[in-house]
């Protein structure tokens, strides 16, 4: 018996707003949202991988222990970085000598953009 990754879950102060950023960034279909038994709204972006944005009251204090690596489906790495910044991301490290650039989403979660594959 083995397990599989059902989803990558991201903590968020504003789950719908953060899901909207990632929906635009990844070109995903409309999100699926549901409320838990206490009325907190979760937002799911289906695809590979499925992303679930869960509401939390806590602030982010340290570097992510897990992050997403993105590459442009078409175009250039710099063009993709510019597009993501236009959506609300922020460049935080150009990682001189390495092929990736580190950005954060609107809530400060780090992710990397690499050259096209």
Image (tube, helix red, strand yellow):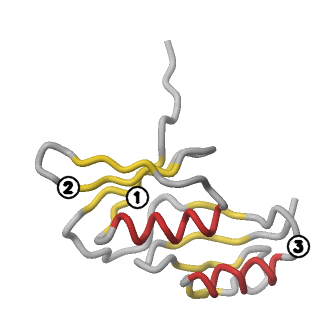
Q: If you read the primary sequence from the N terminus, does the residue marked by circle 2 or circle 3 appear first?
A: 2
- Give coordinates of residue 115: x percent, y percent: 83, 70
- Marks 1/2 in contact by CB < 8 Å: the verdict is no
Callout 3 environment at 10 Å: few (<14), some (14 to 19), or many (20+)?
few
Q: Nearer the viewer, residue 59 or 48?
A: 48
- Give coordinates of residue 1: x percent, y percent: 49, 12
Q: Nearer the viewer, residue 117 or 26?
A: 26
- Give coordinates of residue 69: x percent, y percent: 66, 62
Q: Residue at x 69, y 64 (%)?
A: 70
What whole-number distance in Å separates the C-alpha atoms at marks 3 and 1? 27 Å
Q: Residue at x 54, y 84 (%)?
A: 88
What whole-number distance in Å separates the C-alpha atoms at marks 1 and 2? 14 Å
Which residue is labeled 2 in the image?
40
What whole-number distance in Å separates the C-alpha atoms at marks 2 and 3? 38 Å
Which residue is labeled 1 in the image?
10
Which residue is labeled 3 in the image?
75
Q: Residue at x 45, y 61 (%)?
A: 65
- Label 3: element kind: loop
Callout 2 environment at 10 Å: few (<14), some (14 to 19), or many (20+)?
few
Q: Left of 27 or right of it: where is 30? A: left
Q: Left of 92 or right of it: where is 71? A: right
Q: Left of 89 or right of it: where is 13? A: left
Q: If you read the primary sequence from the N terminus, does the residue marked by circle 1 or circle 2 appear first?
A: 1
- Label 2: element kind: loop
């Amino acid at each position: 018996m083995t397990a599989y990754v059902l989803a990558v879950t991201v903590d968020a102060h504003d789950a719908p707003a953060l899901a909207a950023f990632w929906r635009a960034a990844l070109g995903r279909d409309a999100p699926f949202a549901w409320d838990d038994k206490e009325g907190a709204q979760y937002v799911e972006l289906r695809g590979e991988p499925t992303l679930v944005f869960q509401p939390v009251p806590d602030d982010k204090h340290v570097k992510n222990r897990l992050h997403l690596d993105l590459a442009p489906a078409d175009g250039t790495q710099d063009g993709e970085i510019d597009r993501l910044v236009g959506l609300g991301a922020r460049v935080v490290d150009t990682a001189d000598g390495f092929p990736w650039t580190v950005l954060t989403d609107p809530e400060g979660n780090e992710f990397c953009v690499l050259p096209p594959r």
